[in-house]
Amino acid sequence: MRRMNNGSTNILEIENLTTTLRIPGGKVSVVEGISFNVKAGEKLVIVGESGSGKSMTINSILQMVPDSLIDSYKGIIKIDGENILEMSKRKFKDIRGKKISLVAQNAMTSLDPSYKIGKQVMEIYRHNHKKASKEEAKKETLILLDKMGIKNPEHVFHSYPHELSGGLRQRVVIAMALTGNPKLIIADEPTSALDPTLQLQILDLLNEINQKFGTSILMITHDFGVVSYFADRVIVMYAGEILEMGTVDEVINYPLHPYTKGLLKCIPDLSWLDKEDKIEKRKLSSISGEVPNLAKKLTGCRFAPRVSDIPEDYHESSPKMHKITDTHWVRCTCYQYYLKDSIAGLEGVK
Amino acid sequence: MPLYLIKRMISMLYVLIGVTIIVFLMIHLIPGDTAQTLLGGEATKASLDALRHKMGLDQPLIIQYFIWIKQVITGNLGYSYSLHINISHLLFPRFLNTLVLTIASLLLSILIGVGLGFFSGLKKNTVIDKILSALSVFGASMPVFWIALMLMWLFAIQLRLLPVSGMYNLRGNGGFADLLMHLILPTIATSLVSIAVISQMTRNVVSDVVNKDYINYYQSFGLSHYQLNMKHILRNSLPPVINIIGLQVGYILGGALFSEIVFNWPGVGLAIYTAINSKDYPMIQAGVLFIALSFVLVNFVVDILNIVVNPKLRDSNK
Ligand SMILES: Nc1ncnc2c1ncn2[C@@H]1O[C@H](COP(=O)(O)OP(=O)(O)OP(=O)(O)O)[C@@H](O)[C@H]1O
Ligand code: SF4
Ligand SMILES: [Mg+2]
């Protein structure tokens, strides 16, 4: 059942996933034909501008696009070898929390204000371990809170969410996501609501979890600083498609797609990130041109207007994914043009 | 005892004092001479003076207030000059009857109002939600006495399913079943508006809570609908819903007074109504005092409940 890729198991395999929403006046594909894998123990980060379909990708994997919005999911989403799109709702409910779980985007608003922290973590723990007694759940919860680097687990256990700082709440949210010992945790901008120092602490915690428990992490961000600090591999998304995918080194140091280059060129301001210096770090904000209105179907490459230095005949009308190395893929032909100049540099890397 | 409880009790004491002053002044500032009204135009000066002295009307207002308060505290509400009876003997049982009607109406409003509102809120914008919303707008805009008359006409007079009025069948044995039969129409009349208001507001609160991040987050773990609805959505809708219910208790109590008059239910409302007709001021005063004190007490209980179910409030009140 499980497919091997580079010698390691894939926890998540996505093939040709297209997610279509119903909107007033028609349908719109917010995720379009994307394919990627997350390997066991891997940290994969999806980066892209606002509206590029990052959250929709995650919501598709967790089947959490609201019923009022979803038209269809097409393609294959395999979690631990099983296609969840062909699975009963009941069975998928069992997978959530145990094989795959979510770290909420905004820890300030993702805990129930009416219950104490301990009660909430215990509730999810007991949901994931149906046979666990109350005492057992309490013990495990305290251990988990302690593992999350929380100094005084007993105190936090007996606190209400509003009594805790943002950083503590984020740690609690991560603890909840870990109650079922999932193989993969998915984190949608887990640090964007925090201040820089806390951002680093949370990234460090996730790193530690990844290393200690071997949990794979799929993270979303719009911040190339987070990418370079945290990721093993990167996916660059734009308007529901994957434009470039590769190891963090390939994408940051040898970007091939004009869009990726644009993102990286834009903001070299990484003042908040001063720990790591291995890779040149860049922060992403926005680049010229707007994310196109998805409801209007475009023909031809969306980036042709942005790339002025390439002869007309290099453009594809509808670009396909091109394989550069085993790990580096790009949805563009113009790389060949650029490669002519930098072929030596690239070969040095590969 | 938690500090917030003591704080609320002290502030309730202030309100109580204010309420008694207003009720006291309300009667004493009515133009006209009480003794004259009671004895009629042909009373002699001596008999008027005697009565004034007996009623304490010749004392300064502030002394009269304290005399009255002292009596009220000891359970003496004065003497009814129209019914020739000690008011407390009459009013305490009447007050219990009003309580029966009010509590029955309150329970019905909460049960149906919160139930329908919760359901609508979960199913926001579906056909059933829209039908329920339309019905509740209709229900909320009808006056109690009109509803009461319509119910009486339909169920008691046309269909003859239920008794027309009163609390017990005079020729029956006065059992609990008999009481229930008599209770149905006044209760429905009293609670219909509140059912509509509570369900409408509950719907809005619930549909708000449903969209909260934490509900979404809990859902991501695959919790059952039942667990989500009962443990998280209902729980977090509770504080505002209790507030709404608290506000409605006042309306229900007021509505019960109207229903009593229409259905001849022997409560405080009917007593005040009769007393107004016979200008029985001490009786009016005592009746109004009863109602006002009930209001204050209800608000106190709602306040405390609110603090108990709302952790954030509890902290700011520590
Ligand atoms: N409720 C909705 N109704 C209609 N379209 C929506 C809705 N939510 C999202 N979309 C569309 O789906 C597309 C992808 O949105 P998504 O939330 O996945 O973006 P994102 O990459 O997560 O952006 P952000 O960084 O702002 O979170 C957007 O173009 C957006 O217009
Ligand atoms: S089609 Fe042209 S512009 Fe578009 S990505 Fe490829 S080469 Fe670049
Ligand atoms: Mg998003």
Image: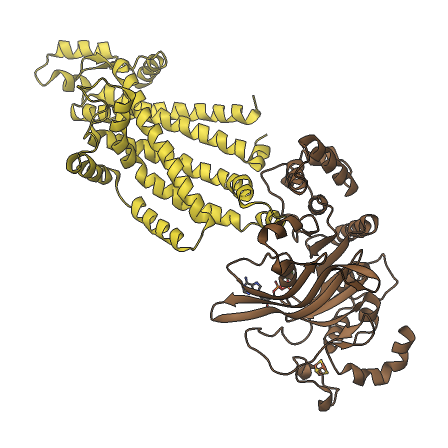
Vertical order, B272 against B79 (above or below)? below
The residue lying at 29 percent from left, 21 percent from top is B176
Say which colour chain B has: yellow
Question: Which residue shows up at 56% across the image and 49% down it?
Answer: B212
Q: Could you tell me if residue B218 is visible in this image?
A: yes
Residue B181 x %, y %: 25, 28
User: Is residue A261 left or right of A87 when viewed as pictured?
Assistant: right
- Number of marks: 0
Query: Which residue is situated farthest in the front direction here?
Result: A1
B315 w.r.t. A103: above or below: above
Nearer to us in this view, B38 or A164: A164
Tell me where residue A136 appears, x and y as whole percent.
71, 33
Q: Quadrant of residue A85?
A: bottom right
Q: Nearer the viewer, residue A267 or B260?
A: B260
Q: Locate residue A164: give its quadrant.
A: top right
Q: Which quarter of the rendering shows the C terminus of chain A?
A: bottom right
Looking at the image, residue A19 sits to the left or right of residue A343; the answer is left
As drawn, A313 above or below A156: below
Q: Is residue A67 above or below residue B249?
A: below
Q: How is the image coloured?
A: by chain
The structure residue drawn at horizontal position 30% and vertical position 17%, both measured from the top left corner, is B92
Chain A color in figure: brown
Instruction: Give the x, y percent position of residue A105.
Output: 66, 53
Q: Nearer the viewer, residue B57 or B137?
A: B137
Q: Is residue A96 visible?
A: no
Q: Is residue B129 left or right of residue B236?
A: left
Quadrant location of the N terminus of chain A? bottom right
Which residue is at a point 76% across and 78% down the rendered structure image?
A322
Toward the right, the furthest residue is A348
Image coordinates of residue A316 in percent, x first then y, are: 69, 85
